[in-house]
Image: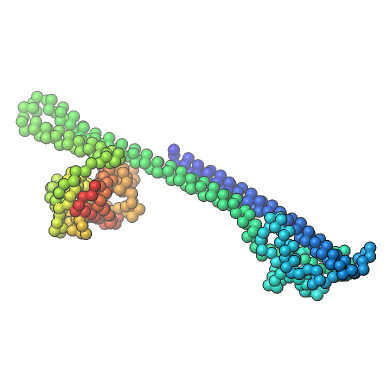
Amino acid sequence: MNRRFIILTIIVMTLALGGLMGIQIYWIRNASSVKEANFRRSVNEAITKVVSKIELLEKRRSIEKSKPEGLLNINPHLPYDDFLTRSILDSLISRELNIRGIDTRFEFGIFKPENEAYLVEKSPNYRKELFEKGYAFPLFQSDIFTPPEYLLIAFPNEKRFLLTELWGMLLISLALIIVIVYSFTYTIATIFRQKRLSEMKNDFINNMTHEFKTPIATISLACEAMSDKDIMKSAQLSSSYITMIQEENKRLAGMAEKILQTAVIDSGELKMKPELINVHDIIHDVVKNIRIQVEIKDGVIIKSFYASNPRIVGDKVHVTNLVYNLLDNANKYSPRKPMIRISTENSGNGVQITIEDNGIGISKSEQKKIFDKLYRVPTGNIHDVRGFGLGLSYVKAIVEEHHGKISLESEINKGSKFKVFLPFVYKE
Ligand SMILES: Nc1ncnc2c1ncn2[C@@H]1O[C@H](COP(=O)(O)OP(=O)(O)OP(=O)(O)O)[C@@H](O)[C@H]1O
Ligand SMILES: [Mg+2]
């Protein structure tokens, strides 16, 4: 998959996701206006019923008081004190609202605009709210001789009530959106990871082919030379060719071993053979092997052994490879006059090995990645230093097997410092 196609897919998916979210928001808003309209209608129905009940109560009371009534009721209605208390009105309203599924706090009052006064009210604290946001219903409309009075009702928590009605829908939408966004980013991240991995694998195959080709070519040349009878006559020449073949063969075996080792680590079948080992002896041996490569480049390699107890329980072969890999890197990535220092000290309950170089260094962002398998710091198209990108992932695996720690301090163009801590005792 090429980069442009991936970016196009991301853009299309983002747009589709944005569109989907827009539609979702539109539907939720629609649903909320429907809920609001329903609420208003129910309040209307409920309070109209309340109003007619109030009028009925008044009529009954006036009959009881045997007020003369003609065909046309021309008398003003009874004062509210006579037939309606605050609590009766409260229970009337609350009953009618409850029947219609509205069980949120409400405030009410009977307002007489003529006197600008409340004749009955639930609590005096909500007068302003009742007046500004309340629903108003005229009372005793047939009573043409009394100036109009209104039953006002307000719901201080109206918005919250409507929202709780929509809560379920909002939550489900939110959860679905989170799931979609998460899956989307996860998919994109996976695509990029896979792409990087496939590029690294390609680099690895190229590198490996190159690394194997050189010794194979040398061996075949040496074999060709040795098939020449004249050369075979000279003992010195033939022995030098044999040594050459042996050396190259060793190199090939070493490389094959390195690749196999990684496969073993991957399969989780890395076997350790713990025994008492002396870290100083191991470093000594590795330095002896690598010194010549450093000195060819006019460099030096300095050992500083400060650990008073360099003996730990660990796997000799793996710890040797670990030290070799770190020293090999210190040399490989120090292009001019390598100045490599390897030191040891006792810290806590183990030995700390520090390997310091004055090489090209590693930037902060790359420092996290270099322990990944096959990862090599990109240096443009040409890599003048050959390698598989396996060394540090192997080192990390070995350190972890020993329950140790590895850390890195590095600055670009200044150098790098790898610290490896290995505990005295080996825990299975
Ligand atoms: N001492 C160092 N100084 C600068 N860069 C380093 C150093 N050690 C490692 N690196 C960077 O980390 C990368 C990974 O190192 P690692 O040892 O895993 O692989 P490699 O050296 O490329 O190959 P090999 O598998 O042969 O060791 C290297 O490619 C290099 O870019
Ligand atoms: Mg290496």
Q: Which residue shows up at 66% across the image and 61% down it?
A: 104
Relative height, residue 196 to residue 121 (above, below): above
- Where is residue 265? Give x, y as percent: 28, 41
Relative height, residue 188 to residue 243 (above, below): below
Please give the count of numbered marks on the rendered protein.
0
Most foreground residue, 224 or 16? 16
Describe residue 106's horizontal placement relative to residue 82 as left or right.
left
Q: Which residue shows up at 88% across the image and 66% down it?
A: 63
Q: Quadrant of the N terminus?
A: top left
Describe residue 55's horizontal placement relative to residue 425 as left or right.
right
Q: Which residue shows up at 63% across the image and 54% down it?
A: 165
Relative height, residue 224 to residue 355 (above, below): above
Residue 359 visible in the displayed image: no
Residue 319 visible in the displayed image: yes
Q: Quadrant of residue 160?
A: bottom right
Q: Quadrant of residue 92?
A: bottom right
Residue extending furthest right?
A: 71
Q: Quadrant of residue 74?
A: bottom right
- Where is residue 28? Give x, y as percent: 63, 51
Most foreground residue, 18 or 181? 181
- Where is residue 256? Give x, y as percent: 23, 36
Describe residue 23's horizontal placement relative to residue 86 as left or right.
left
Relative height, residue 29 to residue 8 (above, below): below
Most foreground residue, 342 or 294? 342
